[in-house]
Every structure is written in structure tokens, then in C-alpha cells.
């Protein structure tokens, strides 16, 4: 027997594999003559949320097979975390498709940064020939959503929607779609796909499971802590002018040891969520803080943790004015006076990237 949602063969053995349903639930539903859905599809149908999936070989192949049925893909990206939510591996899979890039959470940036500037910045970083396909929005504040739908209906009547977890894909779809969800079976695939209809438009949006990443600070935190440190409202920012042997913490999981050789000491800003503690201290005291205050004073993590609970790495960068150093899933450092050398300590898998400034120095 097959699941009437995704079409996977029903099985009772392995909850992690497609088609699983507890045997007693199955028997009860057969007895009552009810539709047979696997556990995963049941959750999708009744709670309207797809469970996230790992980005692995299986998922890539499934994504490829869905893509066949679509001309247009809507890719939701988080402006707070561009480096880990716009990903080359995903861009490669989408090659040949018309991609509409939805750059979400614009409300987090300082008000002085204009939408036009953000668009230009994104345009320089992604492969697109048509700037109209970069849509800067805020699902939270309802900004840019109507014009996004207008743009989409000019292109097609069905769109595949993808994105890594926590970019605001569900928030966006909840704002532009009705509450009606249909599980959409695709031949040969077992991932849930949810077909949703846009309000007041002849447009169907096919939602896919959020793609889990492993290179964001966010990914290392428990779900409650993730919720706490996901930024709400404008980001917090603070200026630092460290002199001498100084260390600056952006929470407990990211440490900047500043080293400089020029006469002028560096000036930089940190941008992150309001829940993330910024703290400057003497180099000598930094080790002790890291060993003893992780998770109580230095947040995140949100609970007292041991230094040994994480595997750490150190990377050194030379940073110049006009550049930013992004720490995936946490925030960024923006240089105001440089150049200077910084040694960054973060957990092993966390992605670090130097980029052109998103928040221009004059802001
Ligand atoms: P998904 O995993 O991509 O479906 O993401 P969700 O829709 O669950 O959103 C993840 C988090 O981002 C939630 O805490 C949302 O409240 C928040 N979020 C979503 N859209 C926005 C936005 O436009 N601005 C801000 N500041 N937060 C947002």
C-alpha cells in the first residue's frame, strides 16, 4: 500500500525512512476507512509545515527531479545571513531555470540602507542577467510582497519555492497564500511538497522542505536558543576602537583577536541580533572568559556550556576599509578604519567570509 500523500510505500519499521506509519495507527485508519497518510505527510497536512531535510545526495536528486516540472524557481535568501543562505551548490542545481531571488528580512538593516543599494549589492554577488528578478522584501513587515506576486504572475502560474531553514520561507508563504494546503505527489520522489495558492492571483506556489545547513552558528544551538537569537527588529550594532592587545567577543562562540601593525588603531562595528552579547576585553582575560563564562555571560550559547563541548578553529584575515567579515548565522564585523589583522576563533564548521560591505561606511 502507498501513502496517499507522497506515494511512498507504507512501512512500519523505520520512522526516519519514507512511508513510515505506526502499525496501530495504520490499522485503526483502515478499520475506519480513512485515508492512509505516512507520518510525515500527516504532519504536513495537519500542521502545514514541512520537516526540514539534510542537504545530501538523496535530497539533491529529488530536487533535480522536481525541477523538471517547473520553469520558475523562487529562492528565498536571508539578507542577515547572505553567505550561508545563498549557496553555490544550490545555484549549480538550479542552472538553466529562471530564478527569482527573494531577499528577505530587509527590515533588519539600518534604515539608512536603501532597497536600491541592497539590490545592487546582491546583483554583484549572484548570477542573474535581469535585476528585476532580485526582489527585496520583508515577510514580517509585508514589504514588497504584492509586487513580488505581480512579478511572478507575469512569468508563470506555478513556482517551486526553495530555501535553507530559517530564511522566512514559511512566513513569506503564509503572507501571500491562502491556508489551503495540498500535498503534491511527484512521481518517483518521496519528499513532501506542499501546493499552496496565492491569494487573489492565479498562481500556485509549491513549497519544499527547508534545507538544513551545518555551517552556521545558529545550527549549533538548541531550538529554543535559535529562536532567541534569531533577530527581530533592527540589528544591534556597536563601534569598537580597540587599542593594544584586545579581544572582542560576539557572543561566546565567536572571538576576534585584533592585531595591527599600522600607527592608527582599527575602528570597526559589529552587527548582530540584540540577544547576542558584545564584549571587549584584554587579551589576557579572554581565555579565562571563554573557559568559564560560555553561555552565562557570553551568549549565545544560551545555557552554560563547556569550552570542550565545541571543536574550535582559528582563521586569520587582513581586513580593509569597505570590507566586512561575515560569521555565518551570527552577524558581521564592518571595518571603519583599517587595514588590520584579526584572528577569528569560532567552532570548526562555521563559515567565515570576507565581503564587500553591505552597510556602507557612511551609514
Ligand atoms: P523558514 O524556516 O524559512 O520557513 O522560516 P520561518 O518562516 O519559520 O522564519 C524563521 C524566523 O525568521 C522566524 O523567527 C520569523 O519570525 C523570522 N522572519 C521571517 N521573515 C522575517 C522578516 O521579514 N523579518 C524578520 N526580522 N524576521 C523574519
Image (cartoon, rainbow, N blue to C red):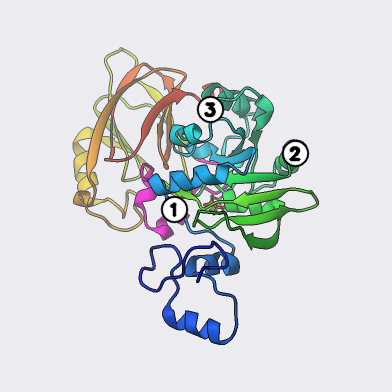
How far apart are labels 1 and 2 at the CA level?
30 Å
For disc 1, the marked residue is 53
Q: Which residues are magenta?
A: 213-235
Q: Is residue 148 left or right of residue 33?
A: right
Q: Mark 3 to mark 1: distance in Å? A: 32 Å
Q: Residue at x 48, y 70 (%)?
A: 39
Numbered tag placed on residue 147 in the rendering: 2
Residue 304's image quarter? bottom left
Residue 217 visible, this angle: yes
In the image, farthest residue toward the bottom: 31
Q: Is residue 300 visible?
A: no
**213 vs 87: above or below:** below
Residue 341: name its quadrant: top left
The Cα–Cα distance between marks 2 and 3, rounded to whole angstroms, is 25 Å
Residue at position x 31%, y 55% in the image:
296
Q: Nearer the viewer, residue 120 or 251?
A: 120
Spot occupied by residue 230 in the image (x, y as percentages of width and height): 48, 49
Residue reaching furthest to the front: 1
Disc 3 packing (10 Å; few <14; some 14–19; many ≥20): many
Where is mark 3, residue-wise? 359
Query: Mark 2 CB in 8 Å range of ligand 1?
Result: no
Picture layout, residue 303 above or below residue 249: below
Viewer-nearest of labels 2 and 3?
Answer: 2
| Dot placed on the residue nearer the N-terminal end, 3 or 1 | 1
Question: What residue sits 60% from the left and 80% below the top?
Answer: 34
Q: Nearer the viewer, mark 3 or mark 1?
A: 1
Amino acid at each position: 500500500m502507498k501513502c496517499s500523500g507522497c506515494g511512498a510505500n507504507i512501512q512500519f519499521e523505520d520512522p526516519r525512512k519514507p512511508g513510515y506509519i505506526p502499525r496501530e495507527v495504520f490499522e485503526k485508519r483502515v478499520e475506519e476507512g480513512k485515508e492512509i497518510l505516512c507520518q510525515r505527510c500527516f504532519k504536513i497536512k495537519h500542521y502545514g509545515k514541512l520537516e526540514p531535510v539534510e542537504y545530501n545526495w538523496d535530497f539533491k536528486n529529488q530536487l533535480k527531479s522536481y525541477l523538471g516540472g517547473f520553469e520558475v524557481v523562487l529562492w528565498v535568501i536571508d539578507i542577515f545571513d547572505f553567505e550561508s543562505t545563498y549557496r553555490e551548490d544550490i545555484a549549480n542545481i538550479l542552472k538553466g531555470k529562471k530564478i527569482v531571488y527573494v531577499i528577505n528580512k530587509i527590515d533588519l538593516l539600518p534604515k539608512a540602507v536603501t532597497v536600491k543599494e541592497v539590490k545592487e549589492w546582491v546583483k554583484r554577488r549572484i548570477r542573474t542577467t535581469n535585476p528585476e528578478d532580485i526582489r527585496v522584501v520583508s515577510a514580517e513587515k509585508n514589504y514588497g510582497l504584492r509586487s513580488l506576486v505581480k512579478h511572478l504572475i507575469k512569468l508563470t502560474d506555478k513556482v517551486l519555492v526553495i530555501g535553507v531553514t530559517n530564511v522566512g520561507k514559511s512566513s513569506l508563504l503564509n503572507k501571500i497564500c491562502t491556508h489551503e494546503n495540498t500535498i503534491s505527489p511527484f512521481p518517483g520522489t518521496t519528499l513532501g511538497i506542499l501546493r499552496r495558492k496565492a491569494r487573489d492571483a492565479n498562481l500556485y506556489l509549491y513549497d519544499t522542505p527547508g534545507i538544513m545547513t551545518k555551517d552556521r552558528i545558529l545550527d549549533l544551538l538548541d531550538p529554543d536558543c535559535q529562536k532567541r537569537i534569531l533577530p527581530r527588529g533592527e540589528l544591534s550594532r556597536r563601534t569598537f576602537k580597540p587599542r593594544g592587545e584586545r579581544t572582542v567577543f560576539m557572543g561566546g562562540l565567536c572571538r576576534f583577536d585584533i592585531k595591527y601593525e599600522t600607527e592608527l588603531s582599527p575602528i570597526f562595528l559589529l552587527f548582530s541580533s540584540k540577544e547576542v552579547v558584545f564584549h571587549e576585553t584584554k587579551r589576557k582575560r579572554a581565555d579565562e572568559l571563554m573557559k568559564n563564562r560560555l553561555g552565562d555571560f557570553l551568549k549565545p550559547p544560551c545555557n552554560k556550556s563547556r569550552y570542550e563541548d565545541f571543536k574550535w578553529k582559528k582563521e586569520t584575515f587582513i581586513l580593509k576599509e569597505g570590507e566586512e567579515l561575515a560569521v555565518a548565522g551570527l552577524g558581521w564585523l564592518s571595518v571603519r578604519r583599517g587595514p588590520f589583522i584579526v584572528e577569528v576563533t569560532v567552532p570548526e564548521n562555521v563559515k567565515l567570509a570576507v565581503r564587500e560591505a553591505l552597510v556602507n561606511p557612511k551609514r
